[in-house]
Image (cartoon, coloured by chain):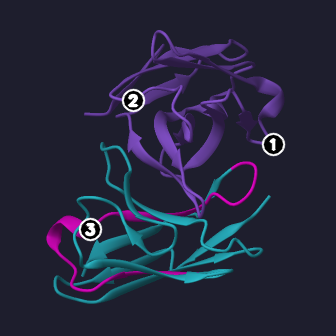
Amino acid sequence: DIQMTQSPSSLSASVADRVTITCRASQNINTYLNWYQCKPGNAPKLLIYGASNLHIGVPSRFGGSGSGTDFTLTISSLQPEDFATYYCQQTYNTLWTFGQGTKVEIK
Amino acid sequence: QITLKESGPTLVKPTQTLTLTCTFSGFSLSTSGVGVGWIRQPPGKALECLALISWNDDKRFSPSLKSRLTITKDTSKNQVVLTMTSMDPMDTATYYCARFDTLPTTSYFDYWGQGTLVTVSS
């Protein structure tokens, strides 16, 4: 199995802050990397696919980068609706796996 | 408009078999590159991908759960059914179905159901 490790596991930030979340794969996954946003009681939402492609309807303050084993999700200016848990996911091998999540909390 | 909805029991007893149905609209499971997956999230824990079924009937399973899982599709009814045998309290989770699409450089879940909480308890 490919293991996905996110850091940090949680962070506190203020509105308008720039936030960066990293995700490391246990082996090369090229750009088979997606990011999702999860809020309690809601279905997960796709933010970024293929490491750097913004999903339709996702605000441009979200950005993704990386390839191989190291990836980054950046929120350029945190908004109140962005407080949530974020998951990376690899779709490189047979069954897809998620990271353990990064919870973004209000400072 | 693409929608998916999970249905099934909210409470199952240990050792029983869970059967969940995903009913979807707005896309066809006969379209190349498209499929449906099942993902679960235990309370306070991370997402876990359980099983995938593709337009061409290719099936994939979580290695740790493979012996307990079955996934089937009914293209004419726009449904995908997941069965999980030998349910245990550790299987208590919100179960989601989601559509996936496949590109040359990645695949991803782009539309999700709202999820259904399944509790395993005697």
Q: Position of residue B57 (x, y in %)?
A: 68, 26
Q: What's the mark number on residue A83?
A: 3
Give residue B27's mark: 2
> Label 3 sits on what residue type?
Phe
Which circle, 3 or 1, is nearer the viewer?
Answer: 1
Q: Which range of residues does the magenta coloring cover?
A: A71-95
Residue ID at (32%, 63%): A84
Residue type for callout 1:
Pro
For mark 3, name the chain.
Answer: A
Which of disc 1 and disc 2 is earlier in sequence? 2
Q: Picture coordinates of residue A66 (x, y %)? A: 55, 83
The colour with which the image depicts chain A is cyan
Q: Residues within 10 Å of mark 2 (few under 14, many from 20)?
A: some
Mark on residue B9?
none
Looking at the image, residue B11 lies above or below residue A98:
above
Chain B hue? purple
Residue ID for mark 1: B63
**In the rendered view, does B79 fall on the left or right side of A59?**
right
Residues at marks 3 and 2, CA–CA distance in whole angstroms: 31 Å
Closest to the observer: A44 or B25? Answer: B25
Report, in whole angstroms, how far the alpha carbon at label 3 lies from the one at label 1.
33 Å
Q: Position of residue B38 (x, y in %)?
A: 56, 35
Could you say where residue A17 lies in the image, as x and y percent from the top left? Answer: 23, 89
Q: Amino acid at mark 2?
A: Phe
State which mark lies toward you, 2 or 1.
Answer: 2
Is residue B51 rendered magenta in the image? no
Measuring 32% from the left and 81% from the top, which residue is drawn there? A12
